[in-house]
Amino acid sequence: MKLFYYQDPGHGWVKVSNNLLNKLSINDKISSYSYMRKDYAYLEEDCDVGILFDALEKKGIKCELISKVSRNRSSKIRSYDRYQNGGY
């Protein structure tokens, strides 16, 4: 599984579908430090990404991160809605 890792000068997020979070039964474990837009969540790198990786490991799912770095400006992800319990 390939996942995109977005990073700006201050923080990073992994983009994942809400559908995957539901399938892994972790949608209610994601904090409001993550963001959401349409059918995707952008999991913050300090805590929520760890929850995702633990759940993927338990299911035997390997993932590859593809880095998308914005070196000089804040990411537009910061303007998205904060993640709400369950993603909706």
Image (tube, rainbow, N blue to C red):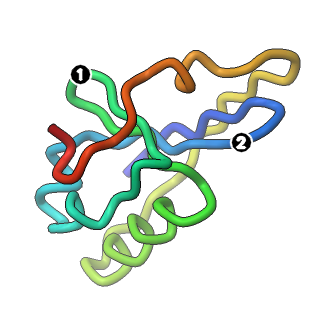
* Residue 86 percent coordinates (x, y): 16, 51
Q: Which mark is residue 11?
A: 2
Of label 2 and label 1, which has the lower sequence position?
2
Relative to 85, 65 lies left or right: right
* Residue 51 percent coordinates (x, y): 41, 70
Query: Which residue appears farthest toward the bottom when viewing the image?
Result: 58
Say which residue appears at 13% left-offset and 56% top-offset. 22
Relative to 51, 38 lies left or right: left
Amino acid at pointer 2? His
Q: Residues within 10 Å of mark 2 (few under 14, many from 20)?
A: few
Quarter of the image for the C terminus: give it: top left
Which quadrant holds residue 47?
bottom right
Q: Answer above or below: position of 23 versus 81.
A: below
Secondary structure of residue under mark 2: loop
Say which residue appears at 19% left-offset and 66% top-offset. 24
**Residue denoted by label 1:** 38
Q: Answer above or below: position of 4 versus 47.
A: above
Q: Residues within 10 Å of mark 1 (few under 14, many from 20)?
A: few
Q: Nearer the viewer, residue 83 or 60?
A: 83
Q: Which mark is residue 22?
A: none
Q: CA distance from mark 2 to mark 1?
A: 21 Å
Secondary structure of residue under mark 1: loop
* Residue 29 percent coordinates (x, y): 29, 67
Q: Answer above or below: position of 2 versus 8.
A: below
